[in-house]
Image (tube, helix red, strand yellow):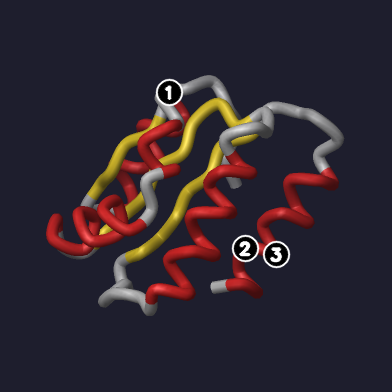
C-alpha cells in the first residue's frame, strides 16, 4: 500500500499543478490491514488537496467498496468520485470529466 501510494504521489508531483484524474483498479481487493487502511486514508487526505478533478475506483463487488469506505473516510471528502464494477465504464466516466487519461 505504501509503495503504491508513493508511486502515485511521485507522478502527481511531477505534474506541477496540472489537473489530473485517478483510476484506481481495486478488482483484486479483498480487504486490508488496519495499518494499510491508515496509509490509504492518509494518501486520500493528501490527494484531496491536489489538483485532482475526478477519481474513479473499480471494485469486483460492492462489499469491497463498502469495506474501503468504512475504513478510509477521506474517500468521502472528495466530491467528484465514483465507484464502478468494470474498467470501461470507469474510463468513460473519467473521460467525460474533461481530463485526458492514459
Identify the residue at image location x=56%, y=43%: 45
Separation of residues labelled 1 and 2 (CA atoms): 25 Å
Q: Quadrant of residue 98?
A: top right
Q: Which mark is residue 96?
A: 1
Q: Which mark is residue 13?
A: none
Q: Position of residue 69 (x, y in %)?
A: 29, 51
Residue 6 marker: 3
Question: Quick one: 34 or 29, which is closer to the camera?
Answer: 34
* Mark nearer the N terminus (1 vs 2): 2
Q: Alpha carbon of mark 2 to alpha carbon of mark 3: how far?
A: 4 Å
Q: Residue placed at 35% from the left, 76% from the top?
A: 32
Disc 2 crowd, CA 10 A, few/some/many (<14, 14-19, 20+)? some
Q: Secondary structure at mark 2?
A: helix
Name the residue rendered at 55%, 26% in the picture: 53
Q: Which mark is residue 5?
A: 2
- First along the sequence among labels 1 and 3: 3
Disc 1 element: helix
Amino acid at each position: 500500500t505504501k509503495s503504491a501510494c508513493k508511486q502515485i504521489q511521485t507522478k502527481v508531483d511531477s505534474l506541477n499543478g496540472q489537473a489530473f484524474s485517478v483510476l484506481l483498479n481495486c478488482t483484486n481487493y479483498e480487504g486490508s490491514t488496519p495499518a494499510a487502511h491508515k496509509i490509504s486514508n492518509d494518501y486520500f487526505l493528501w490527494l484531496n488537496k491536489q489538483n485532482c478533478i475526478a477519481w474513479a475506483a473499480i471494485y469486483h463487488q460492492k462489499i469491497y467498496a463498502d469495506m474501503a469506505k468504512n475504513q478510509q473516510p477521506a474517500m468521502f471528502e472528495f466530491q467528484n468520485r465514483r465507484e464502478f464494477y468494470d474498467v470501461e465504464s470507469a474510463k468513460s466516466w473519467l473521460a467525460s470529466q474533461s481530463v485526458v487519461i492514459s
